[in-house]
Image (cartoon, helix red, strand yellow):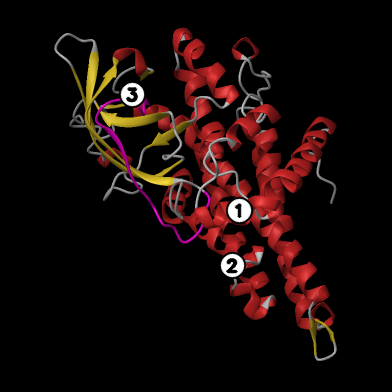
């Protein structure tokens, strides 16, 4: 079926991104994979391509386009090629909404031009050791100084994508204890300068997948954070996080769908070329049936993400809608990629083959941004259960 969610402008952008990926990323991706990180200077190239400024207002150097569909194209094209742009997805997909919606005019003038140019890379630090999806249980604190000029930040975060290269990190911290009726009260957001004394990047985590994404542990020891770096109002951070979670979860759903679609592409190419018992693997009935079943599932996932994309751009995507899209698409992707890997036989287990990397990369989709179990809780609550 013909997709209707993208315009000619989106498709022109797709061609540009595809050409960029094939010429600039694919030839060196194995080097990035071995190093476990994207080179910092690569983000300047993405900035020159215009990737970081699409949704940034024009007065700060961006294109001022209020739509997530260009980011969707980017997710689809990187998955199609079996590559990743590292932590840059967090920079745009997760951090930008907080800057656009919460930053003061002075903060925007200070940070957004550098955001667009790639000079100031952002990450976001929510998760802590031992708390997982329970953000209300965070222990990192930010104590306001007696003279009211700064906060003193103490604590630790983990699983921070983009944490190694980040110049500023949006840190979630407790500025007040939870109230008797609301344990989510008292959390605030800060855009912390990573060069601040007491701010430390710990080990870069060795993950099962997403090898080129710089995922790190962070620690804060008496870090002085100027009050001018507070994002939004104090103590309201949990509400702010909730407002942006639908977009984050949709981006995960989109990425999972795109990975599943890419896995089919890789499996079709491999089975057409691979000869077994004197004929291509693609000619066996089992191969045809497996790929046909995978295609049907991906078609359904495509319909889900396209509908959700339209809802997001029109401001109608609810938390339950996003949870449903994430749950469905990540589960579909796990099944499809597994079946496509199986069709590769032993070579599907070798990381030089894109399907093996997809298999490892995909697994985290059912964990981060809220686990599948949390998604089910959100959906069930919306059902009145």
Judge whether residue 5 can be spotted in this image.
no
Q: Earlier in the sequence, mark 2 or mark 3?
A: 3
Q: Which residue is mark 1?
A: 256
Nearest the viewer among 372 and 363 is 363
Nearest the viewer among 246 and 21 is 21
- Horizontal side of 131 relative to 362 (left or right) equals left
What is the CA distance from the residue labelled 2 to the residue labelled 3?
44 Å
Q: Which residue is mark 2?
A: 351
Nearest the viewer among 240 and 14 is 14
Q: Position of residue 39 (x, y in %)?
A: 55, 42
**Is residue 180 covered in magenta?**
no
What is the CA distance from the residue labelled 1 to the residue labelled 2?
19 Å
Q: Position of residue 192 (x, y in %)?
A: 35, 25
For label 2, the SS is loop
Residue at image x 23%, y 10%?
Answer: 149
Q: Position of residue 32 (x, y in %)?
A: 57, 51
Q: Position of residue 265 (x, y in %)?
A: 76, 62
Q: Give the vertical position of 244 relative to 113 (above or below).
A: below
Q: Which residue is mark 3?
A: 236
Judge whether residue 101 can be spotted in this image.
yes
- Horizontal side of 262 relative to 100 (left or right) equals right
């Amino acid at each position: 079926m013909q997709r209707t969610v993208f315009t000619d402008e989106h498709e022109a952008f797709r061609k540009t991104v595809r050409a960029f990926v094939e010429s600039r990323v694919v030839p060196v991706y194995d080097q990035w994979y071995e190093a476990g990180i994207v080179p910092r200077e690569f983000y300047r190239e993405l900035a020159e391509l215009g990737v970081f400024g699409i949704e940034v207002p024009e007065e700060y150097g961006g294109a001022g386009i209020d739509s997530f569909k260009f980011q969707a194209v980017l997710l689809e094209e990187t998955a199609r090629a079996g590559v990743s742009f590292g932590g840059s997805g967090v920079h745009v997909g997760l951090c930008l909404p907080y800057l656009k919606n919460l930053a003061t005019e002075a903060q925007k003038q200070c940070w957004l031009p550098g955001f667009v140019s790639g000079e100031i890379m952002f990450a976001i630090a929510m998760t802590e050791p031992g708390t997982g999806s329970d953000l209300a249980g965070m222990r990192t604190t930010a104590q306001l100084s007696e003279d009211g000029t700064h906060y003193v930040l103490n604590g630790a975060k983990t699983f921070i994508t983009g944490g190694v290269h980040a110049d500023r990190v949006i840190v979630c911290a407790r500025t007040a204890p939870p109230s008797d009726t609301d344990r989510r009260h008292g959390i605030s957001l800060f855009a912390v300068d990573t060069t601040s004394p007491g701010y430390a990047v710990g080990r870069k985590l060795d993950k099962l997948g997403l090898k080129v994404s710089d995922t790190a542990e962070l620690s804060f020891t008496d870090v002085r954070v100027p009050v001018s770096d507070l994002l939004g109002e104090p103590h309201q951070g949990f509400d702010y996080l909730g407002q942006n979670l639908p977009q984050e979860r949709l981006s995960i759903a989109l990425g999972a769908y795109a990975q599943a679609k890419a896995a089919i592409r890789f499996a079709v190419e491999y089975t057409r070329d691979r000869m077994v018992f004197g004929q291509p693997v693609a000619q066996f009935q089992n191969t045809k049936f497996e790929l046909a079943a995978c295609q049907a599932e991906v078609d359904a996932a495509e319909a889900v993400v396209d509908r959700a994309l339209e809802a997001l751009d029109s401001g109608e995507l609810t938390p339950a809608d996003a949870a449903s899209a994430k749950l469905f698409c990540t589960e579909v992707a796990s099944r499809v990629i597994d079946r496509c890997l199986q069709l590769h036989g032993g070579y599907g287990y070798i990381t030089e083959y894109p399907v093996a990397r997809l298999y490892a990369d995909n697994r985290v989709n059912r964990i981060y941004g809220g686990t599948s179990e949390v998604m089910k809780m959100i959906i069930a609550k919306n059902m009145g259960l």
